[in-house]
Amino acid sequence: MASHRRPKPVGRARVSILTAAAATAVALSAQTGAHADPAPTKDQVKQQVDQLNEDAEVKTEALNASVEKQQNLQKQVSQLQDQLARQQDQVTTVQESLATIAAEQYRSGGIPQTMQLMLSSSPDTFLGQAGTLNTVGATQADLLKSFKAEQAKLDGQRKEAEQKLAELDTTTKALKAEKEDVQAKLAKAQELLNTLTQKERDELAAAEAKAASESRTQAERASRDTARADLGAVAAAPAPAGYAGAAMSAALSKLGSWYSYGAAGPSTFDCSGLMQWAYAQAGVSIPRTSQAQAGAGTSLGTNIANARPGDLIIYYGDQHHVGMYVGNGQIVHAPHTGAQVRYESATVMPINKIVRI
């Protein structure tokens, strides 16, 4: 007799299992989402960008040092090449003189000059000609000695030129690597800024513009009324006399100019480039990098009370930033990429050294 039992609902069971699996997946997804790192805030992004800009500035000063070294090496190599050319001419001249003597000996059949004189048809003139022979022998010996000396000098100069060329090649490669490092840090900073909304980016730009605008306003106020008793309300004190004052006036004339790594004016600057440019306007040459500028004058320690307008203030343990003291506890400096030349409190960064040029 045939069975009439109903078959098991396989399809329904499968649906139930799939539904349970989907629910579990959704629950796990929600759990994972709950533990995901939240997007950084505007202030956090700014902090990271500021750090990247500072790291880039450290590399910028290393870049500036490499550029300066490369330029000096190129000059040295050029001078050595000129010396080599002149020395080669000198060696060639001596060689030609020796060749003339050798050719004369060949034409005479290789008979020693002493024997030629003794076999002369005029023995009476022998003694007189013997004096000439001694002179010729001495000249030949002097030429040989001169040739050896000039050749040794040429070899030394050639070796020195090869060493300088190798050093130049190493410096050029380091320069390329440092430039790429700076660019990578600045690109990372821009990537972080791009994670912000347009409104947040506008707010950061507005804050930077406000800081630059306040610096210009303070400068204008100072120039209009340097006789005011309340100089605390003015960013810069009156410029002193002499080249320090001229350098200070030049630096202040660039308030609002944009920072650009590796730039030393006249329209954009990095920190040490602004200092070098300002002192150049006063007719004073100072080194290119902040580290070199730290040793360019008289060290006055770290107490801001010792500073006078026009002094350089070197910052951080590695001396990677520099500003110019302008009085009233203020400096003028080129802060970092994305910022403009502006006033800042002289103690806003850790002071490494105060230098009077």
Image: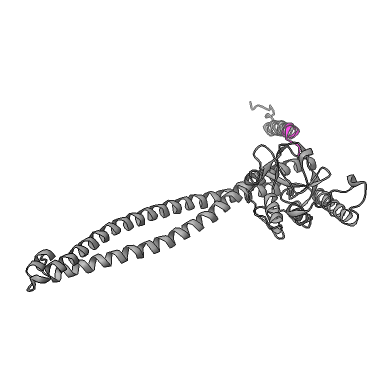
Left or right of residue 226: residue 118: left
User: Was residue 34 drawn as part of the magenta stretch in this picture?
Assistant: yes
Question: Which of 19 and 194 lies nearest the eye of the viewer?
Answer: 194
Going 44% across and 58% down the picture, which residue do you hit?
80
Q: Is residue 122 above or below residue 292?
A: below
Q: Position of residue 91 (x, y in %)?
A: 32, 62
Going 64% across and 39% down the picture, which residue do you hit?
318
Q: Quadrant of the N terminus?
A: top right
Q: Position of residue 266 (x, y in %)?
A: 70, 60
Q: Position of residue 295 (x, y in %)?
A: 63, 43
Going 62% across and 46% down the picture, which residue do you hit?
292
Question: Which of 328 and 90 lies nearest the eye of the viewer?
Answer: 90
Q: Which residues are magenta?
A: 29-40
Quadrant of the rendered structure where residue 40 is? Answer: top right
User: Was residue 339 drawn as part of the magenta stretch in this picture?
Assistant: no
Quadrant of the rendered structure where residue 242 is? Answer: bottom right
Furthest-right residue in this view = 229
Residue 340 makes an appearance in the image: no
Numbered marks: total: 0
Question: Which of 327 and 12 lies nearest the eye of the viewer?
Answer: 327
Left or right of residue 204: residue 287: left
Going 53% across and 48% down the picture, which residue do you hit?
174
Left or right of residue 17: residue 155: left
